[in-house]
Image (spheres, rainbow, N blue to C red):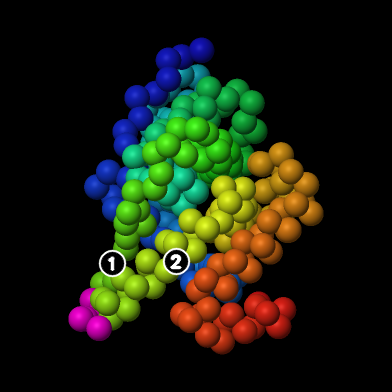
């Protein structure tokens, strides 16, 4: 097998991924626009076929297309930038090592995100994670031009959302991220995490319920819709 690729850090100068938005918390239609995998470069299947033959440059091209997306999945689960970098890089290394088992023609992004989610959950469960805790401000984002009042409200909302996400178990966070951010099906999440679809639905329901309760003052009508079973 060829040596592992020398991967760069995943967030670098590209900017920190956005924190989970309120519509995502509630399962509402609004979604962040995803740009990875849509550039007009070489065909992904061609690049992965080249990578299977040991072409590191081809694989690094694929990595660049998905590194922010994978980093974002990891960050939302581990809640620490440096750890998210490590998880994302390890996910790509494991993907590289398993390319011979990857079915060419299938989307690469969801596959490597599932790897990252598993690694992230394993990290959060580890004694190291419990010892290190969570740095403050891990998921800060900025509005383009919020103004003085908007900046205060934006910061307060981020703080509440940060605390609410931290109140979820690692398993709930993983299911929530894969469903609402990666838009995976229950079956795909179940296969990725080694659990049943029923467990996926149960964890997702509990996660949304806890987040909705914590974010109630900011969600207003949307929270009431969730309780009414219409969201």
Query: Magenta segment range?
Result: 145-149
Q: Main secondary structure of the magenta part?
A: helix
Quarter of the rendering containing residue 149: bottom left
Please name the residue that numbered disc 1 is placed on. 142
Q: Secondary structure at mark 2?
A: helix
Q: Is residue 74 above or below residue 6?
A: below
Left or right side of 70 for 149: left
User: x%, y% of residue 171?
Assistant: 62, 48
Which residue shows up at 71% across the image and 39% down it?
A: 194
Q: Is residue 126 one of those drawn in magenta?
A: no
- Between residues 16 and 216, which one lies in front from this camera angle? 216
Q: Residue furthest top?
A: 1
Q: Farthest residue in the bottom direction? A: 221
What percent of the width, then of the height, locates residue 45?
54, 37
Image quarter in which the C terminus is found: bottom right
Closer to us: 134 or 80: 134
Work out whether 138 lies above or below 8: below
Examine the rendering and report whether any part of residue 38 can be seen: no
Picture quadrant where residue 153 is located: bottom left
The quadrant where residue 182 appears:
bottom right
Which of the numbered marks, if any, corresponds to residue 198? Answer: none
Residue 148 part of the magenta segment? yes
- Where disc 1 sits, the SS reads loop
In-image side of 142 versus 106 (left or right)? left
Query: How far across and down, in percent of the image, does residue 70 sit?
Result: 46, 45
Question: Residue 196: in sight, yes or no?
Answer: yes
Q: Residues within 10 Å of mark 1 (few under 14, many from 20)?
A: few
Q: CA distance from mark 2 to mark 1?
A: 14 Å
Residue at screen point 53% across, 30% down: 95
Whole-percent x, y for residue 44 in the image: 50, 40
């Amino acid at each position: 097998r060829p040596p592992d690729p020398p991967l760069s850090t995943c967030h670098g100068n590209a900017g920190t991924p956005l924190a989970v938005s309120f519509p995502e918390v509630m399962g509402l239609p609004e979604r962040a626009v995803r740009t990875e995998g849509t550039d007009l470069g070489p065909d992904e299947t061609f690049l992965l076929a080249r990578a299977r033959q040991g072409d590191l440059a081809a694989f690094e091209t694929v990595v660049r297309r998905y590194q922010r997306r994978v980093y974002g999945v990891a960050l939302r689960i581990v809640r620490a930038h440096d750890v998210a970098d490590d998880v994302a890089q390890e996910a790509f290394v494991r993907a590289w090592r398993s390319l011979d088992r990857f079915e060419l023609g299938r989307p690469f992004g969801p596959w490597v995100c599932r790897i990252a989610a598993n690694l992230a959950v394993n990290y959060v469960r580890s004694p190291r994670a419990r010892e290190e805790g969570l740095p403050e401000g891990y998921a800060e984002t900025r509005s383009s031009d919020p103004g003085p009042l908007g900046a205060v409200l934006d910061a307060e909302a981020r703080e509440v959302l940060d605390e609410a996400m931290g109140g979820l178990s690692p398993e709930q966070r993983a299911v929530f991220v894969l469903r609402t951010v990666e838009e995976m099906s229950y079956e795909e999440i179940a296969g990725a995490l080694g659990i049943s679809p029923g467990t996926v639905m149960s964890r997702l329901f509990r996660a949304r319920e806890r987040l909705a309760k914590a974010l109630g003052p900011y969600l207003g009508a949307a929270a009431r819709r969730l309780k009414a079973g219409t969201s």
